[in-house]
Image (cartoon, coloured by chain):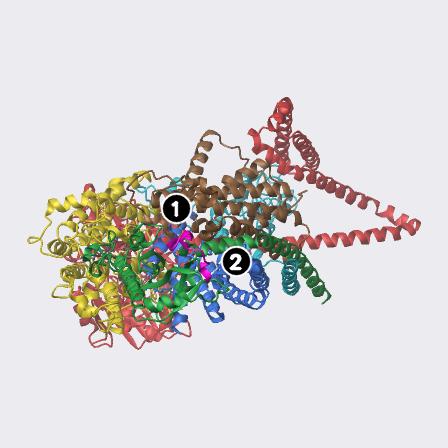
Chain colours: A red, B brown, C yellow, D blue, E cyan, F green
């Protein structure tokens, strides 16, 4: 018997799993259109490599991540690309993102596949590349690109490979059913990953509320070194960190990854995807999704093509729209609500709950935290949720961070147990978001400071150089005067060129001077603009403004004439500019006139 | 520092920058001796005298002290005033002196006094400094009296008892007792009552201020010119 | 289709704060029953009165602060505060004294800090300590003489009359010094045997009081069983009292025996219902142990050497004062962090 | 030995300088906004208080008393204290600028911390000998530091609470101090000093 | 009588001279220049370099704060910056001084390229060199470097620079705080 | 270095100047008020004694006219006892004895008991106690008149059995809520009277020898061994 450890906290929510385990996995079929978001994983979004109207084959790569972390997206079936546009995607924000919409042609025609039956003959890097090219990112949680995860840092040896079949969240049964029905594929995938990593121990962890799955996996694992471990049912035993603690007694260091302690955790669905990618050359184009909840009459699991609208799956499961109150993507503990069912299945979608109002009722209004400590008793990360909440609510994010806010896995337990119905997790998410924004701003500020300082230094340098040059020129001029006669001829020879330069320089100088005057009054202009209502219009300021506007107009006019003379292509622009400046002058004049009219009473009133 | 008008000085001392309620300084004597009105007045008057004297003196000598000995010098001035006050009280109101105990010499360390010397008197001419001293002293005295009255009334059900300690025999029967059979509420007499009482006074002042502010903002929306103080970082752009 | 938008988790456990408080109220029933049986109707009347005043004071403050009344009143916390005051005040304390206690508890100690959850001090104990120092006569001479309810006077109507009369003291014959009081001031000049002759001690440890304390212990165990409180505070507090009195009090001619400390006065009420007030107690397990133990030590120190024969109220307040500091220095070790494992039990090796 | 212990218990708990004797209240209210600041202030005050206690004892016993100048005690003590504080201030300013800015106006205010002069005067009133004076000064500072630090931690908590507007800040601080003082009344009678 | 007065004065004089000397010594020995606090304050300012605070850039403003100046003059930083400054300095946060401007959403400058005449004036105006281009050619703003200070808007002779607020983006999206509409807290009342 | 020396010199001179001015002011004030203060202080210190034996009944300097009395196990304090003697025309008229009631509610209650030569109580005052405020503190004259009820009593009036509080069958009132404190005081006064009666002969003798007058007054506080701190509330 394998030794098991316990982890802190945890809860036993109502499981609600039997509804969806009564039927075998059904094939969802091909809907009318498939919507494939370009970002279905952590990292950089993919870029479409097909054009609208193009015909694609099943399994053909249609989007790729040219650089940065990410995996490609494949066409789940053959058809034509209808559009590449922003559409609603599965995301808690309910916002749109870039998606490729594919109209299936019903032929389901495969592109060229490259199955490798004897992957052991290949280099490991080649296998990893094949996994990447199959577009595999984790199917169990965050959607981390699997090939990157399978290549731990050089100095880290993975000694324990865990296959996560705990599926601790209520309602979800996708992994359960997968393990019951596809145990051989799982073992095959696990073997590939084990071959890549060469761990000392391979464990498949299954909660003890899934005896059928455990039996199936044990049977499939017979004759291998793979352990199938049944762990006690307790949410969130499926959380990577908790599972690792249960199986090894070790803790993943804060801010680190499991590989730091020689462990790696993969979802069972990921294992199947790997097996199919290598052994059949099939990229990740389908997954098992649980459709459940009291608002559907035939809850169960579907093997659906990625991009299948959830609408479609719901109707296959017999949705009763009238009863539907809340649509949750994911489990009831960690999933997020959707504001429309018109959203595609992606690589990480494991469950859709179509809940009625009785099933997942609206939360009670938030009461005050009574520091009862139920939340800290139950928090699997041994945090102090109520402290985090106080600080998050009061906007003291630094303190929340100090109390390890970022170690929170957002498992939802604290909110679940809180007698005061405080949406704690939302506070943490908000706080985390704010902190990230602040950090980004800080970074930006630091860069701005650097650039500002660099500019100041540059200006100073230029100033000095100018000064130097001026001195030199003065000196040169003095010398020049001495040899006036001798130089005279040379000067006339060069005459034209000098003239031209001088004229330009004069122009620039003139502009500079005017601009200077302008700048000086610019702020005042603004002042007077803003001070429209203020009682004392500053006559001299207005006058200055007027002269400034006039000078600006002049410049523009001369520029326009120049441009006209040169037949330059920016004539029309300049014409517009001149018009604008005309207006400016007029405005200034009006303002001045108006001010002049009521200057006297206005000044009196300020006394 | 911009010089303040006299009316500003008056308003600051008595209300907007009241040493006890706003600056929250001089708390020790304020809390320690306010169990009865007479104690409060005794100490308040002594403080007022010292504050006037020290503000005046500090303002007179403000240009002659070097930075490094500024503090000791001010403190010595205050201490000499206090010692004189102490000696005089010993000579003329001995019993009150005994009741007020070490809080007479501790006027030296009444933060409000040094605070004023440092923040105001050392930067202003003698006349405003003296006025500031008077007003701050009066503001302080007023709070002392109110707190004393509050604690005496709630704590013992009496008001103005034992005024003879300060004013001589003629005030012996000034004490009043509005309610016969009032059960003494020792909480107010003991230290906790002093803290809570002052807390209530501060809150009262805050809420009055808030109300005034609300009423005023309801009447006139002050014209604020947004961005009127901007400067151009990049200097003159040509 | 208007779909509900909510942050996860979408499922919640159905135990509300109001329900929690209701359980606390129910758990005091055995104690209240024992008090009524052994000390007459006084506590019962007090409890009802205090709850009424507490709700009224809470409602008044809420309306001044412009908060919805019903929502806050139904959280039952004001009722708990009133209840606990009613249980701990002397049986014959005049109604106006208990009203002052309750009002200062709710207004000053709770609502001024922002109401439920924000108060750093235990409201009930603030009220208790305030009237104890303000009206020592009423608070020290009004302890009922123990005697079975059906055998001894005064009856319900008379008790009500006495309480409402407003007199600070009640006729002798109904009242008696409490055991802790008696022991404490007599032991300086008498031997233990002489002290124990006083009828307040009865045959057991302390007549009536022992049953009352036992009943509160029972109620407290129910709260632990229901996971409304954890064991840390009561156990560490009782253990600290026991250890202190065993360490110092081996000589009964000098210090009260450990049994008296455990079963007289407000020990059990304090340990299970008062020190455990979640709002004003420490939060982490380690913090709770420190908090509870310190209360225990303070209770013993003040009982033995201070002026007050029972010291639960003061000790709880003193430690309330230290709670933010304790909390600051006893955060639990978070998963995956290096600091030494502290105060996180339940790491079973399976 | 017990006698010395009793002095400490008395000054720290029973006759706590801040909550019972009403000394040192301004820094108590002024520097209790943040725990770290309060700790800095505690250290500074402990240092100054103990030192002032010693210095003023020496000044009185070896200078004023022999010369029959008892009436100069207030001014002498305050001079000694002011110099000690000013000296400390200069050193802190040089060595720890942040502490300096944070304690800002409060370092000079240690001079006007009644507790410091109070200790010197109370030592006299109580006829404390040298060791007792030192202990008394230290105990007073420890009592001050204890409540200051606890109070600061508590104020950090109150700062995030939903306190009624009029009570925010100093007012609720006062009420809290009052309740703390109420709790400290529980210690009365503990030691007969 | 006079002797006792004399003794008193002499004793005090002696003490004062000794202590005065000590302080004089310390004043020299522990003299400090400059104020390292400026760095810390500067790091809290948003570095927009917009001058709305009335100082030419963030650093000069930081210097003024270190001297004890008001902390509520920086509109780009808004409440957040004021709060962190108040935290650092342990003073009460004050509301933003509206005379210096109001807090706005984050913006960037965008040059309408078809109208730009390539006058380079915006380049000179930009404090962080966020504008690219050369004379007579149209210019563009490097969006990631632009601080949104709008200093370039005014100098443009053809008014072709727009300040646009940054659109919300799914990748930059963050969770809102929970709505607690039922509990109308005092805090809201205070800020209203 | 020069800078340091310069700085030292400037500061020293500056502060010295202040010292001269302020010191001078204080010293002058002190000299001017010294006599009056001394007089006030003496009067205040003797007040407790004068209250027990009014000035009309004696003509000596009470504070300085003290005698040492033999120790006794009747009185709780150990060692010889310092008592103040009141004389009229050189003849002793009464004596004020310090007494301690050890069984107060909390700690010792210190008293002064004035007795005339016949053994009648002239007056009783409390010099220090730690009884509960609002409860036991009514033994102070400030809080109630109770302490005056001893005046004129002696060991025969009432009879020894009734030297107790009413609750215990005596003649003295207890005050509401507190029996212990008054009982302790009554007992202490009674014990003092008994001590006086038992040592009457010896005491008379001691009192009649007119002793050297002390130069320094002995004030009751010092005898009671207690120093009242400034009253802080
Ligand atoms: C932001 C982020 C960065 C990660 N970086 C790595 C990494 O560098 N190497 C690695 O093997 N796994 C990495 N992981 C994967 C995690 O170790 C973990 O296996 C994965 O996030 C699945 O966790 P979950 O679904 O519980 O959230 C990363 C995950 C996240 C979310
Ligand atoms: C609270 C919590 C519960 C989880 N439960 C499961 C689970 O039951 N099954 C699972 O495969 N992953 C679960 N995950 C995700 C895992 O932590 C982890 O990301 C995943 O097993 C990694 O596998 P993958 O990279 O193949 O997705 C959970 C994560 C959290 C935070
Ligand atoms: C905290 C407290 C303080 C007390 N202080 C005194 C006191 O100072 N003097 C006193 O006589 N009784 C005091 N008592 C009251 C006595 O304990 C006792 O109840 C009272 O003297 C009534 O006694 P009786 O029943 O013999 O009349 C105090 C009681 C308590 C609880
Ligand atoms: C276990 C438990 C103990 C409690 N004890 C007290 C108590 O001692 N005093 C009190 O005022 N309220 C008590 N309450 C109620 C509530 O927490 C209290 O009113 C809050 O302090 C008000 O903010 C208790 C509640 C619970 C759940
Ligand atoms: S469970 Fe809720 S009420 Fe209890 S401490 Fe946690 S957040 Fe507060
Ligand atoms: S959501 Fe975060 S804080 Fe809450 S229980 Fe889970 S890990 Fe702990
Ligand atoms: S207002 Fe703010 S961002 Fe703009 S320059 Fe001043 S400190 Fe910098
Ligand atoms: S581009 Fe314009 S708005 Fe942006 S930083 Fe430069 S000057 Fe400021
Ligand atoms: S008055 Fe005592 S410290 Fe300020």
Residue at the (33%, 44%) spot, across then down:
E179
Residue D176 % position (x, y):
37, 52
Vertical order, B233 against F63 (above or below) = above
Residue at far right of view: A485
Pinpoint the chain carrying mark 2.
D
Image quarter for ligand 2: bottom left
Residue at the (86%, 50%) spot, across then down:
A477
Is circle 1 on the same chain as circle 2?
no
- The image's mark for residue E168 is none
| Residue matched to label 2 | D110
Type of secondary structure dominating the magenta stretch: helix
| Residue matched to label 1 | B197
Residue A22 % position (x, y):
14, 57
Residue F85 is covered by the magenta coloring = no
Q: Estimate the spatial distance between the alpha carbons at disc 1 and disc 2, rounded to whole Å.
A: 25 Å
Judge left or right: residue B45 versus residue A151: right
Foreground: A311 or A518?
Answer: A518
Pinpoint the chain carrying mark 1.
B
Q: Is residue C302 visible?
A: yes
Residues drawn in magenta: F50-64
- Label 1 crowd (10 A; few <14 / some 14-19 / many >=20): many
Foreground: E108 or A298?
Answer: E108
Residue E11 % position (x, y):
63, 63
């Amino acid at each position: 018997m394998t030794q098991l450890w316990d982890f802190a906290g945890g809860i036993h929510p109502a499981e609600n799993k039997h509804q969806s385990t009564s039927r075998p996995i059904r094939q969802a079929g091909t809907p009318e259109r498939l919507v494939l978001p370009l970002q279905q994983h952590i990292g950089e979004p993919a870029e479409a490599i097909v054009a609208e109207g193009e015909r694609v084959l099943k399994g053909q790569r249609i989007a790729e991540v040219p650089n940065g972390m990410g995996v490609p997206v494949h066409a789940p079936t053959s058809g034509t690309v209808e559009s590449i546009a922003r559409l609603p995607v599965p995301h808690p924000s309910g916002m749109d993102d870039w998606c490729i919409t594919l109209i299936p042609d019903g032929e389901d025609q495969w592109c060229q596949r490259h199955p490798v039956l004897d992957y052991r003959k290949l280099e490991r890097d080649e296998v990893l590349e094949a996994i990447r090219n199959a577009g595999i990112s984790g199917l169990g949680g965050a959607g981390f690109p699997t090939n990157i995860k399978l290549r731990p840092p050089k100095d880290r040896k993975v000694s324990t490979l865990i296959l996560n079949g705990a599926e601790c969240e209520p309602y979800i049964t996708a992994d359960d059913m997968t393990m019951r029905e596809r145990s051989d594929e799982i073992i095959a995938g696990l073997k590939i990953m084990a071959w890549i990593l060469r761990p000392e121990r391979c464990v498949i962890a299954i909660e003890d509320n899934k005896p059928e799955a455990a039996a199936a996996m044990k049977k499939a694992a017979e004759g291998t070194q793979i352990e199938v471990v049944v762990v006690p049912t307790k949410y969130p035993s499926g959380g990577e960190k908790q599972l690792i603690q249960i199986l090894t007694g070790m803790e993943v260091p804060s801010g680190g990854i499991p590989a730091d302690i020689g462990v790696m955790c993969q979802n069972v669905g990921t294992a199947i995807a790997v097996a199919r990618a290598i052994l059949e050359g099939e990229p990740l184009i389908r997954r098992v999704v649980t459709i459940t909840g009291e608002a559907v009459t035939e809850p169960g699991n579907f093997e659906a093509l990625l991009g299948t609208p959830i609408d479609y799956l719901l109707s296959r499961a017999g949705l009763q729209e009238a009863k539907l109150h809340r649509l949750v993507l994911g489990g009831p503990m960690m999933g997020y609500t959707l504001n429309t069912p018109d959203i595609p299945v992606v690589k990480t979608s494991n469950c859709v709950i179509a809940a009625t109002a009785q099933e997942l009722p609206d939360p009670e209004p938030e009461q005050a935290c009574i520091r009862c400590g139920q939340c800290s008793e139950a928090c699997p990360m041994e945090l102090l949720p109520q402290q985090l909440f106080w600080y998050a609510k009061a906007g003291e994010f630094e303190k929340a961070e100090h109390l390890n806010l970022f170690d929170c896995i957002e498992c939802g337990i604290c909110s679940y147990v809180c007698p005061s119905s405080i949406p704690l997790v939302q506070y943490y998410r908000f706080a985390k978001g704010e902190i990230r924004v602040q950090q980004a701003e800080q970074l930006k500020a630091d860069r701005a400071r650097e650039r500002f300082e660099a500019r100041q230094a540059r200006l100073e340098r230029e100033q000095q150089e100018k000064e130097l040059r001026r001195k030199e020129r003065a000196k040169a001029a003095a010398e020049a005067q001495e040899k006036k006669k001798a130089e005279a001829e040379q000067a006339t020879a060069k005459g034209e060129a000098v003239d031209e330069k001088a004229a330009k320089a004069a122009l620039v100088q003139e502009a500079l001077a005017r601009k200077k005057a302008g700048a000086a009054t610019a702020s005042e202009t603004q002042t007077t603009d803003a001070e429209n209502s203020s009682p004392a219009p500053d006559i001299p300021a207005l006058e200055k403004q007027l002269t400034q506007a006039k000078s600006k107009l002049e410049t523009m006019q001369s520029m326009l004439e120049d441009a006209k003379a040169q037949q330059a292509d920016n004539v029309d622009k300049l014409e517009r500019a001149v018009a604008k400046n005309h207006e400016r002058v007029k405005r200034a004049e009006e303002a001045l006139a108006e001010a002049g009219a009521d200057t006297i009473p206005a000044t009196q009133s300020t006394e | 520092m911009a010089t303040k008008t006299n009316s500003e000085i008056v308003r600051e001392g008595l209300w907007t920058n009241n040493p006890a309620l706003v600056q929250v300084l001089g708390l020790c004597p304020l809390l320690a001796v306010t169990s009865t009105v007479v104690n409060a007045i005794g100490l308040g008057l002594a403080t007022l005298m010292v504050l006037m004297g020290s503000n005046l003196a500090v303002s007179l000598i403000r240009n002659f002290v070097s930075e490094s000995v500024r503090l000791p010098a001010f403190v010595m001035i205050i201490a000499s005033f206090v010692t004189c006050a102490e000696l005089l009280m010993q000579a003329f109101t001995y019993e009150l002196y005994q009741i007020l105990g070490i809080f007479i010499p501790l006027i030296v360390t009444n933060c409000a006094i040094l605070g004023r010397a440092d923040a105001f008197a050392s930067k202003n001419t003698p006349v405003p400094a003296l006025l500031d001293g008077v007003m701050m002293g009066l503001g302080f005295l007023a709070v002392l009296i109110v707190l004393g009255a509050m604690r005496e009334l709630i704590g013992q059900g009496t008001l103005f008892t034992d005024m003879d300690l300060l004013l001589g025999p003629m005030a012996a029967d000034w004490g009043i007792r509005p309610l016969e059979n009032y059960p003494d509420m020792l909480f107010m007499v003991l230290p906790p009552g002093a803290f809570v009482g002052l807390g209530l006074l501060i809150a009262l002042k805050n809420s009055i201020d808030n109300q005034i502010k609300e009423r005023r903002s309801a009447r006139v929306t002050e014209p604020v010119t947004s961005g009127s103080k901007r400067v151009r970082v990049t200097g003159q752009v040509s | 289709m208007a779909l509900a938008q909510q942050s996860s988790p979408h499922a919640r456990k159905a135990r509300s704060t109001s329900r929690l408080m209701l359980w606390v109220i129910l758990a005091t029933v055995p104690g209240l029953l024992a008090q009524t049986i052994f000390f007459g109707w006084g506590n019962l009347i007090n409890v009802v009165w205090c709850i009424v005043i507490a709700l009224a004071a809470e409602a008044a403050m809420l309306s001044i602060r412009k908060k919805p009344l019903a929502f806050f009143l139904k959280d039952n916390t004001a009722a708990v505060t009133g209840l606990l005051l009613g249980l701990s005040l002397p049986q014959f304390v005049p109604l106006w004294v208990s009203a002052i206690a309750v009002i200062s508890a709710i207004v000053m100690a709770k609502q001024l800090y922002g109401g439920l959850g924000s108060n750093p001090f235990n409201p009930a104990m603030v009220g208790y300590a305030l009237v104890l120092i303000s009206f020592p006569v009423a608070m020290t001479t009004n302890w009922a003489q123990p005697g079975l309810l059906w055998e001894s006077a005064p009856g319900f109507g008379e008790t009500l009359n006495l309480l409402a009369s407003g007199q600070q003291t009640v006729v002798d014959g109904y009242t008696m010094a409490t055991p802790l009081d008696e022991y404490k001031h007599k032991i300086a000049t008498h031997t233990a045997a002489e002290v124990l002759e006083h009828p307040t001690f009865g045959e057991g440890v302390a007549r009536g009081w022992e049953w009352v304390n036992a009943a509160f212990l029972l109620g407290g165990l129910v709260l632990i069983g229901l996971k409304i409180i954890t064991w840390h505070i009561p156990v560490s507090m009782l253990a600290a009292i026991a250890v202190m009195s065993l360490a110092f009090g081996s000589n009964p001619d000098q210090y009260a025996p450990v049994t008296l400390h455990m079963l007289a006065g407000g020990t059990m009420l304090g340990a299970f219902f008062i020190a455990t007030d979640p709002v004003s107690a420490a939060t982490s397990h380690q913090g709770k142990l420190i908090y509870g133990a310190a209360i225990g030590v303070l209770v013993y120190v003040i009982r033995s050497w201070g002026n007050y024969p029972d010291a639960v109220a003061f000790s709880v307040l003193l430690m309330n004062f230290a709670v933010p500091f304790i909390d600051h220095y006893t955060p639990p070790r978070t998963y995956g962090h290096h600091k030494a494992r502290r105060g996180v039990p339940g790491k079973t090796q399976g | 030995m017990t006698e010395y212990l009793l002095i400490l218990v008395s000054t720290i708990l029973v006759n706590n300088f801040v909550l019972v004797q009403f000394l040192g209240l301004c820094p108590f209210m002024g520097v209790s906004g943040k725990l770290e600041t309060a700790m800095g202030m505690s250290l500074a005050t402990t240092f100054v208080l103990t030192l002032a206690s010693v210095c003023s004892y020496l000044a009185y016993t070896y200078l004023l008393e022999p010369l029959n100048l008892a009436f100069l005690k207030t001014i002498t003590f305050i001079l000694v204290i002011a110099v000690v504080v000013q000296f400390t201030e200069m050193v802190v300013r040089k060595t720890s600028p942040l502490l300096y800015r944070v304690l800002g106006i409060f370092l000079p205010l240690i001079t006007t911390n009644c507790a410091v002069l109070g200790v010197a005067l109370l030592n006299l009133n109580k006829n404390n000998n040298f060791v007792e004076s030192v202990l008394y000064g230290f105990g007073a500072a420890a009592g001050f530091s204890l409540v200051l630090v606890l109070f600061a931690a508590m104020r950090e908590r109150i700062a995030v609470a939903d306190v009624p507007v009029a009570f925010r800040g100093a007012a609720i601080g006062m009420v809290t101090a009052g309740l703390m003082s109420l709790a400290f009344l529980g210690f009365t009678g503990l030691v007969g000093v | 009588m006079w002797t006792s007065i004399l003794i008193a004065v002499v004793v005090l004089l002696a003490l004062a001279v000794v202590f005065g000397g000590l302080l004089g010594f310390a004043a020299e020995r522990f003299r400090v220049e400059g104020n390292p606090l400026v760095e810390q304050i500067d790091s809290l300012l948003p570095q927009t370099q917009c001058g709305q605070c009335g100082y030419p850039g963030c650093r000069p403003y930081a210097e003024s704060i270190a001297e004890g100046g008001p902390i509520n003059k920086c509109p780009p930083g808004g409440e957040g910056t004021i709060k962190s400054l108040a935290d650092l300095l342990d003073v009460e946060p004050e509301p933003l001084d509206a005379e210096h401007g109001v807090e706005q959403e984050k913006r960037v400058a965008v040059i309408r390229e078809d109208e730009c005449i390539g006058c380079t004036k915006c380049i000179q105006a930009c404090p962080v060199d966020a504008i690219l281009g050369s004379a007579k050619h149209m210019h563009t703003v490097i969006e990631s470097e632009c601080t949104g200070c709008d200093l370039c808007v005014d100098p443009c002779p053809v008014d072709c620079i727009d300040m646009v607020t940054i659109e919300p983006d799914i990748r930059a999206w963050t969770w809102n705080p929970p709505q607690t509409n039922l509990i109308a807290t005092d805090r809201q009342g205070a800020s209203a | 270095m020069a800078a340091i020396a310069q700085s030292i010199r400037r500061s020293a001179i500056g502060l010295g100047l202040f010292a001269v001015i302020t010191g001078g002011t204080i010293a002058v004030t002190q000299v001017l008020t010294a006599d009056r203060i001394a007089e006030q202080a003496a009067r205040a210190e003797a007040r407790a004694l004068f209250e027990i034996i009014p000035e009309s009944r004696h003509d000596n300097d009470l504070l300085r006219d003290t005698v040492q009395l033999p120790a006794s196990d009747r009185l709780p304090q150990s060692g010889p006892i310092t008592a103040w003697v009141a004389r009229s025309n050189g003849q002793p008229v009464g004596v004020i004895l310090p007494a301690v009631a050890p069984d107060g509610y909390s700690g010792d209650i210190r008293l002064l008991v004035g007795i005339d030569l016949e053994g009648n109580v002239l007056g009783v005052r409390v010099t220090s106690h730690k009884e509960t405020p609002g409860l036991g503190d009514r033994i102070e004259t400030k809080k109630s008149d109770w302490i005056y009820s001893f005046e004129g009593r002696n060991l025969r009036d009432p009879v020894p059995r009734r030297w107790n509080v009413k609750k215990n069958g005596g003649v003295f009132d207890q005050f509401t809520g507190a029996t212990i404190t008054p009982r302790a005081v009554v007992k202490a006064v009674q014990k003092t009277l008994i001590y006086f009666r038992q040592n009457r002969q010896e005491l008379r003798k001691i009192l009649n020898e007119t002793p050297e007058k002390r130069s320094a007054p002995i004030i009751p506080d010092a005898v009671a061994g207690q120093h009242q701190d400034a009253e802080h509330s």
